Image (cartoon, rainbow, N blue to C red):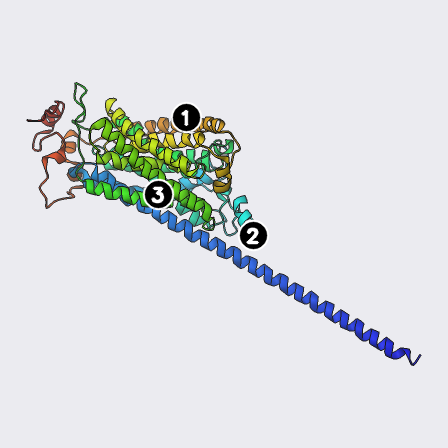
Amino acid sequence: MTALRPRVRTLVLALLAALAAAGSAHAQDAATQEALARLTTASSDLRIGIDTVWVLVAAMLVFFMNAGFALVESGLCRAKNTTNILAKNFIVFAISTLSFWVLGWGLMFGDGNGFLGLSGLFFVAGADNSPALGEAYLAMNPFSTAVYEGVYSSINWTPVPLWAKFFFQLVFAGTAATIVSGAVAERIKFGSFIVFSFVLVALLYPITGHWIWGGGLLGANNFRDFAGSTVVHSVGGWAALAGILVLGPRLGKYGKDGRVTPIPGHSMTSAALGVLILWLGWFGFNPGSTMAAMNGTAIAHILVNTNVAAAMGALGATATAWLMLGKPDLSMILNGCLAGLVAITAPCAFVTIEAGALIGLIGGVLVVLAVIGFDKVKVDDPVGALSVHLVNGVWGTLALGVFYDNDVATNIAALATGLSPFAQLMVQLKGVVYVGAFTFGASFVVWYAIKLVLGVRVSADEEFEGLDVGEHGMSAYPDFATHPSSFGSIAPGLPAAAAAAAAAKPVTAKP
């Protein structure tokens, strides 16, 4: 017995040591798990923070596009209307901010049905302190376990905070309203434009936006528009077309014999600088729509596609204008670049770079044909907004189907439909028809109601004198003598009635 005691003591000590070691290992394992949890949370927070900065920087680039639109539109119009055009481009974003905040955001992204959002209306609301992570985001960051608790679940695929999402979408909504400004320039009442802009961003734009980006009937049925050829550009174009038809053409634009009288813009310098700013801003417009900074492959693909389409659009318009007009018209070159940008906006994450180049090239050709075509049917668009945004918004949306690539859609957009290009084209065509019919019809009703209540067009005297003086009581160039060409074909100093009569006569160049 005595001999067994040391052995028992040894066994007991060994057992106690084993238990102590096990406890220590368990404690270490718990500490390891706790450290891993903290690291996972920190990693997720860092990821969301980086994504948020990317989204906001991209949104600020899109916001800066307002400066580009202001320069393009004012440059392509006459000097006597410069203040008015700058005022419209400035006030339109203020109006868009109010209307989208109050109602538009909720109608577009609020939980509802296939037609419109019904939750979170009347000022942005809802819990978003614990955002959901969509499948694409989770694939890149599988440790995240956040659950969305708000009422805007259609946009929960990005984990950035609610206000980052709101501001990014706001600058897109403002862009749609800005498109209208150029198309109705040089004859619209300032107050009437403000009213229409409010209605467009509060009601019309978000309803069709809900159909596509808000979980509505088109998006749910495989319609694709990555950054807004239809959601933004076509909608702005359809609304502008309705406004042009209600307003009518500018005095002196079309003669009784059907001849078109050119009314040149006053500053091609301004127009060219504006397009360069827009080209830059589009690098936020399209790549920013990834709303995920860590997806470098997608950002790079989309950015290069955007740039290639813009370049090819400019080249396509240059060649077409040279062949059809005899000269490489700068205004056509500029609008060709914008046409390529608009056309690639929808398909940039669904097509190859080679396809993007072809889409832009065709867009550049189309814009020249469209400018000439609209003039032939007496649709007066001073800056070519319809040709750029409506025609090429439709083309870009359809081009997504024509050149659709499932591999690109899977790897870049993470939104592959699995459809063949023809089947995808049919889906895209249906979406174009739905959005066009609703937006044009509703916009025409709104424009006509404004015409009956407030009037939409300035008087002939005010149009002849210039909207700067009549609408704002000031001139953009008070220290410079205005060249007669800035008044189009109408000689300054004539009474409005005489000016209108003179404008109806064709201008014959003197030898």
For the point 26% across and 43% down, which residue is it? 274
Mark 3 Cα-neighbour bin, 10 Å: few <14, some 14–19, many ≥20? many
Q: Quadrant of the C terminus?
A: top left
Whichever of callouts 2 and 1 sits on the residue coming sooner in the sequence is: 2
Mark 2, other Cα within 10 Å: few <14 / some 14–19 / many ≥20: some
Question: What whole-number distance in Å separates the C-alpha atoms at marks 3 and 2?
Answer: 31 Å
The mark found on residue 250 in the picture is none
| Residue behind mark 3 | 282
Establish if 184 lies above or below 56.
Answer: above
Classed neighbour count for the residue bearing mark 1: other residues with Cα under 10 Å, few (<14), some (14–19), many (≥20): few
Q: Is residue 410 left or right of residue 502?
A: right
Marker count (numbered): 3
Numbered tag placed on residue 433 in the rendering: 1
Q: Quadrant of the N terminus?
A: bottom right
Q: Nearer the viewer, residue 489 or 87?
A: 489
Q: CA distance from mark 2 to mark 1?
A: 40 Å
Q: Residue at x 13, y 25 (%)?
A: 503
Amino acid, disc 3:
Trp
Q: Secondary structure at mark 2?
A: loop
Above or below 394: residue 19: below
Q: Looking at the image, is mark 3 or mark 1 nearer the viewer? A: 3
Residue 393 location, x and y as percent? 36, 32
**Under tag 3, what secondary structure?**
helix
Mark 1 secondary-structure assignment: helix
Between disc 3 and disc 1, whose residue precedes? 3
Q: Amino acid at mark 2?
A: Ser
The amino acid type of the residue labelled 1 equals Val
In the rendered image, which residue does mark 2 sit on? 144
Nearer to me, 176 or 280: 280
Residue found at the very far left of the displayed protein: 511
Q: Position of residue 373 (x, y in %)?
A: 27, 24
